[in-house]
């Protein structure tokens, strides 16, 4: 036997027990509040044909003794009870009943039918009497006359209605209704304020958890608003199916799960629980859509509610497990949020247990708890978010202070770098000015030296002309040409380097020998070896003089090697023998000079010129034979010459 069939069978036992001796409800006070249940002046009959009329029901002496039921709760049920007004006045009463799909009420007095009204959760408001709604009907009880009431329940859902009715005097009922409305709207207003507050904070702080808090508040508010029929009565009076509360509950749950994920940052810190919460969000959204389809399309209200309750309990269990597991990893702000989750869970569990396991008082308590709990829960969430934002502000201020300190340090560093760079630029500027001044001086010096060199060339040519009157003119011209080459190479070296004041003498000596070999009419093979302690640089005057000396020595060596038809081997060395004093050594592999060196100097123009140039350099030229002709030219550089002259 199914659960629904068992309930109907138990109700049939109660109705049969009182079928023979049905009592009449006596109303003796103007203020009354009477609940009539099965077995207490109330008979129930299930119309399995679904086609019986009120006339057919009244023709029977009483409702059938046996109460039969089907496997499904959906169907047509008849209820009958009697009441009499024992007061001195006609009474205006309200008949209140559990909300079901369709209800028809007939009131009969001694003279026949007095009143017929329609109500129920599935009725459009236009089919009801003014002032009635989906769970109450207003009527009049005349003095002293026994009234007989018949109610036809057409239950289109799989939810078995509560077969009981409540008689309440109108004044008391309206007073209770106003009180209930006041409580409801205080709760709605509080939830609305919380939602607006969350939206305002979202706009101000652009913090996503405030969005989910606002959506959670909306879901809870609309769930309560819909469950209490305000949505249908106010906005959709002709379409009661709109008043489905379950989807709003699922919306609130979905927003709560998103709020938990955002606030606790589960995706960053608790990845396993984050995946579980994502699945729950997907299920809650699916259940929200499914609830609308099941109720609006198929009228499966109870099945939809049971599925939603199952999902809600699953969500509650998983949230409890998550909070307990991760509690030790939460900071102070997150634990305040955790208290809000636990408060929500406690309220849900209490409301469900009270609704299913406790009496009518328990259901009233559960309703009160379900109305108050969302406010407390959302308030805790708001406090947690406020603490979090405050902590963010503190962290931001600390970060800003650190940033300001860093910026101050950077500014000081930049200022110092600017000062250092400015100083460096000024120094570079001064160096450039000095360099420009030096370059300008050097250019003037170069022009002066070019003029001097031209004059020197002119003097050399005149001397050569006077000296070579008895010599071969071609040979004289060739000698002069080599001297000009030695001098011109000095200027080539100056133009190839940034330093136009000094010459790298080692490089100059090597290139001079190669150049002199290249300009010879008849050439001989030669080998050059350079022995320099280090690369030495000399001023232009010193370099020109040394270059002319080397030119004469190399030319003589080349001439004698050509005459003897042998390979020429040359060695040029330079060593420092004092501060600014040097020895330039030149050696070839020729035969020794037969005559005294002093006589040779007197006879030859080139060696005489070389000797004079050595004296101009504050030195001298010496000769000796050491497995080859060895010439030693001692000289002083420019600074040493100036010092010696002073």
Image (cartoon, grey):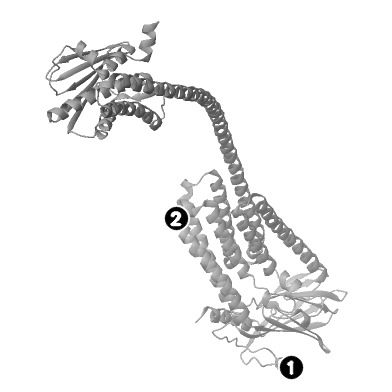
Q: Position of residue 322 (x, y in %)?
A: 48, 55
Q: Residue at x 56, y 74 (%)?
A: 290
Q: Position of residue 532 (x, y in %)?
A: 24, 22
Q: Residue furthest right?
A: 89
Q: Residue furthest top?
A: 646
Quarter of the picture holding the C terminus: top left
Q: 51 or 18: which is nearer to us?
A: 51
Residue 375 is labelled as none
Q: Residue at x 74, y 63 (%)?
A: 180
Question: Mark 2 vs mark 1: which is more N-terminal?
Answer: 1
Q: Residue at x 57, y 78 (%)?
A: 7
Q: Position of residue 8 (x, y in %)?
A: 58, 81
Query: Does any portion of residue 531 appear in the rendered image?
Result: no
Q: 513 or 353: which is nearer to us?
A: 513
The number of numbered badges drawn on the structure is: 2
Q: Residue at x 56, y 45 (%)?
A: 333
Find residue 513 and report its image quarter.
Answer: top left
* 446 is higher (above) or lower (below) than 61: above
Q: Position of residue 543 (x, y in %)?
A: 34, 21
Gap in Å between the C-alphas at discs 2 and 1?
68 Å
Q: Is the residue marked by circle 1 packed among few (<14), some (14-19), or many (20+) residues within 10 Å?
A: few
Query: Does any portion of residue 426 appear in the rendered image?
Result: yes
* 330 is higher (above) or lower (below) than 78: above
- Look at discs 2 and 1 and give the one toward the viewer: 2
Mark 2 lies on residue = 271
Residue 55 is labelled as 1
Q: Is the residue marked by circle 2 packed among few (<14), some (14-19), or many (20+) residues within 10 Å?
A: few
Horizontally, residue 294 falls left or right of residue 489, namely: right
Q: 95 or 274: which is nearer to us?
A: 274
Q: 151 or 202: which is nearer to us?
A: 202
Helix, strand or loop for disc 1: helix
């Amino acid at each position: 036997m199914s659960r629904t069939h068992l309930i109907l069978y138990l109700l049939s036992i109660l109705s049969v027990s009182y079928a023979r001796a049905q009592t009449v409800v006596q109303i003796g006070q103007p203020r009354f509040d009477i609940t009539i249940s099965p077995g207490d002046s109330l008979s129930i009959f299930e119309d399995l044909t679904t086609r019986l009329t009120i006339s057919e029901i009244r023709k029977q002496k009483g409702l059938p003794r046996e109460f039969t039921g089907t496997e499904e709760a959906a169907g047509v049920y008849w209820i009958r009870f009697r009441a009499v007004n024992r007061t001195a006045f006609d009474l205006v009463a309200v008949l209140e009943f559990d909300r079901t799909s369709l209800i028809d009420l007939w009131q009969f007095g001694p003279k026949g039918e007095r009143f017929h009204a329609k109500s129920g959760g599935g009725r459009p408001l236009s089919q009801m009497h003014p002032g009635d709604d989906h769970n109450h009907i207003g009527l009049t009880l005349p003095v002293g006359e026994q009234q007989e009431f018949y109610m036809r329940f057409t239950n289109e859902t799989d939810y078995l209605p509560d077969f009981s009715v409540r008689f309440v005097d109108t004044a008391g009922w309206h007073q209770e209704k106003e009180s209930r409305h006041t409580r409801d709207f205080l709760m709605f207003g509080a939830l609305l304020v919380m939602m607006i507050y969350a939206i305002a904070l979202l706009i101000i702080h652009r913090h996503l958890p405030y969005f989910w808090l606002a959506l959670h508040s909306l879901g809870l508010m609309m769930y309560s608003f819909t469950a209490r029929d305000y949505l249908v009565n106010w906005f959709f009076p002709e379409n009661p199916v709109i008043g489905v509360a379950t989807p709003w509950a699922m919306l609130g749950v979905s927003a709560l799960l998103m709020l938990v994920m955002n606030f606790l940052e589960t995706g960053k810190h608790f990845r396993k629980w984050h995946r579980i919460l994502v699945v729950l969000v997907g299920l809650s959204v699916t259940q929200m859509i499914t609830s609308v389809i099941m109720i609006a399309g198929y009228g499966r209200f109870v099945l939809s509610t049971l599925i939603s309750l199952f999902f809600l309990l699953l969500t509650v269990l998983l949230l409890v497990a998550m909070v307990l597991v991760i509690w030790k990893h939460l900071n102070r702000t997150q634990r305040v949020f955790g208290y809000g989750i636990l408060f929500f869970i406690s309220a849900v569990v209490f409301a469900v247990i009270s609704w299913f396991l406790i009496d009518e008082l328990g259901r009233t308590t559960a309703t009160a708890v379900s109305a108050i709990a969302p406010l407390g829960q959302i308030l805790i969430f708001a406090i947690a978010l406020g603490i979090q934002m405050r902590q963010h502000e503190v962290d931001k201020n600390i970060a800003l202070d650190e940033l300001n300190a860093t910026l101050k340090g950077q500014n000081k560093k930049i200022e110092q770098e600017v000062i250092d760079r400015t100083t460096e630029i000024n120094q570079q500027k001064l160096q450039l000015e000095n360099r420009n001044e030096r370059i300008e001086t050097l250019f003037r010096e170069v022009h002066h030296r070019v003029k001097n060199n031209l004059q020197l060339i002119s003097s050399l040519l005149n001397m050569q002309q006077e000296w070579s009157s008895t010599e071969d003119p071609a040979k004289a011209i060739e000698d002069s040409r080599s001297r000009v080459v030695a001098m011109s190479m000095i200027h080539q070296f100056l133009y190839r380097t940034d330093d136009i004041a000094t010459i790298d003498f080692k490089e100059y000596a090597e290139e001079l020998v190669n150049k002199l070999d290249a300009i010879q009419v008849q050439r001989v093979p030669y080998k050059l070896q350079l022995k320099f302690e280090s690369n030495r640089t000399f001023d232009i005057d010193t370099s020109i003089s040394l270059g002319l000396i080397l030119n004469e020595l190399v030319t003589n060596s080349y001439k004698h090697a050509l005459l003897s038809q042998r390979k020429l081997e040359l060695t040029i060395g330079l060593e420092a023998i004092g501060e600014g004093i040097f020895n330039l050594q030149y050696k070839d592999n020729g035969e020794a000079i037969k005559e005294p060196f002093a006589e040779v100097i007197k006879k030859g123009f080139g060696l005489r010129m070389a000797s004079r140039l050595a004296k101009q350099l504050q030195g001298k030229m010496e000769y000796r034979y050491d497995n080859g002709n060895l010439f030693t030219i001692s000289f002083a550089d420019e600074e040493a010459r100036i010092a010696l002259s002073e």
